[in-house]
Amino acid sequence: MKQFLVTLAGVFCGLLLFFVGLPLLIVSLAASASRPAAAPTATVLSLDLRQTLSDQSPNTPLAFLNGRTLSVLSVVETLSRAADDPSVKGLLVRLPEGGLPPAQADELRLALKGFRHSGKLAIAYSQGIYPSGVSTATYMLGAAADQFWMQPGASLQSTGLTAEDLFLKGFFDKYGVTADFQQREQYKNAVNPLLYTDYTPAHREAELGWMTSVYDTELTTAAKDRGLDPAAVKADLAAGPYSAEDAKAKRLIDQVGELPAAVATLGARAGQGAKLMDLASYRATRHAAVPGGGPALALIGAEGDIVTGTAEDQGLTSAKAGIYSDDVAKAFAEAVADDQVKAIVFRVSSPGGSDTASEQIASAVRAAQAAHKPVVVSMGTYAASGGYWISAGADEIVAEPTTLTGSIGVFGGKIVFGPALARFGLNLRDLTVGGDFAGAYGSAEPFTPAQRATVSAWMDRIYQGFIAHVAQGRRLPVTRVAEIAKGRVWTGAQAQQLGLVDKLGGLALAVAEAKRLARLSPDTAVVLKTTPSHRSPFDMLQRMAGLGGASAESFMAAAQVLGDPKARAVMDELARARLQADGQAAVLAPMPIR
């Protein structure tokens, strides 16, 4: 009996720690991470791009545990706010040693140019730029600053773009693995590495096509920002690599010096007593004023692979982005129901995904338009395949010059492992009840002729539906869309020439276009309502405990009774987080477009 009571007490303590102690610890971490420090009177901001940025802020309350405190959009919004803040005197941008996604660099460049337009000094500092496939994007961003510094002895190796694909066909043949796939059409090359030992002519043409477009765009832009001849800049960079000292001699950068010297230059401009503050901390100290009762735009975010369902069951600390069709459709419905919302900006950064999930989102776009809410798509790093499907029906599409878009096509199939496993004495067999197609996607054998014909007909139906959807959304003849589709990826600059994109620019341009379509003056201050709203620690606690709001608060009160000295502070933070979640809105100040 005594042992039973000891065991029971241990189980009770364990449950108490799990359901009370763990939530308290997590929420305390969230509270301490979000508690801002006061900004100094004179501030020089620091933006460190050596850590990967997502396009949009992850919709999870504990994303900060993964080191994700900023996104491209939050940087854009914060720099816009800082440009109008008299306490902010300058900006230091730490460049990565590798490459940036080209469209990210485009968006950040526009934000940097907007910040500079306020007359404040911006310095880009590099400890070297090395080959990484897209290092020219990093160089382009550095060239957009007032001064481009490099550390002594560092190397500038932005000599061009490169892409590397691993072809597995020879390996598969050696070990008896079969890749049984079909594509619509020849440029839909995502599965080519499984089917071939080298680039097909179409694969080579498409990949070199977008790479050349990105390369020309980035270096032409960099040359323009530095007041140099584009042909000369291309020739000089291609002839590299260079030391920092040689790069300065060729006017590819402005200064060679240690980081403290760059900071001192910013400090001298800012004045005595200026302090250096990272952008994330500054963002936490400054909150935009929300005009009451005025017009609003809904900003609906969509980043990652497109899938059906909802993100409710996503891991609490996961920062992996995903586009859940139920969530996006609900966000559109909420924007339609909100009388304050006059138009919708749909931010898309996705390589594709489920066709049925894409169509659910496309239907939500049409419903918003039917309710007289114009929809403007702002494309991020890519909006290809399913990402283009959900964008094509918008009233207007704005893309960065280097956004990867299009890829109007489809592929499907399976990898067959049965013969390969048999070589090692492993016999993969299957049993099927029902029709012949029930076991079509088993990995023991290739498709039968009947199964292959069924898959082919299914892919034809999706492909023709995709073409028809694009033709209707873009108001183009079906024959024209069929000609430029075929699964080919285009850059935003190429897509604009083909009629797949309307204008080139970033989020600020998309906001301006949404205002225009909503018949609002360009100078009208609007609330930018971000949906879906980000989950707060309070929401997290409710989901963990499976309780209503009152019960969760009682849980916290019980913890206080148990003697937790920080419980009251945590409860205060939870209440504050709840209020912020209930009334979350941000104002995007007008940003100059270059």
Image: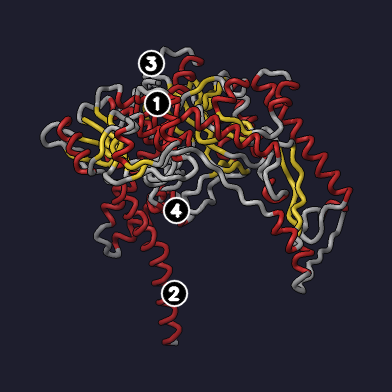
Residue at image position (81%, 53%) is 440
Q: Is residue 335 above or below residue 56?
A: above
Q: Please name the residue shown 37% across and 35% down the image.
A: 75
Q: How crowded is mark 4: few (under 14 residues within 10 Å), some or many (20 or more)?
A: some
Helix, strand or loop status at disc 3: loop
Please name which of the two marks, 2 or 3, marks the residue nearer to the observer.
3
Circle 3 residue: 524
**Is residue 448 among what the camera can see?**
yes
- Contact (CB < 8 A) between labels 3 and 4? no
Q: Is label 4 in a helix, a strand or a loop? A: loop
Of the two numbered discs 4 and 2 on the same chain, state the one appearing first in sequence.
2
State the separation of the CA atoms marked 2 and 1. 68 Å
Side (left or right) of 354 relative to 237: right
> Can you identify the residue that label 2 sits on?
11
- Measure the C-alpha gap from mark 4 to mark 2: 26 Å
Residue 457, quarter of the rendered image:
top right
Residue annotated with mark 4: 317
Residue 300 in percent (x, y) is at 50, 32
Element class at badge 1: helix
Circles 1 and 4, Cβ within 8 Å, touching? The answer is no
Query: Of tags 1 and 4, which is closer to the observer?
Result: 1
Mark 1, residue position = 223
**Is the Cβ of the residue at disc 4 closer than 8 Å to that at disc 2?**
no
Quadrant assignment, res 276: top left
Sort mark 2 into few (<14), some (14-19) or many (20+) by Cα contacts within 10 Å: few
Precedes in sequence: disc 1 or disc 3: 1
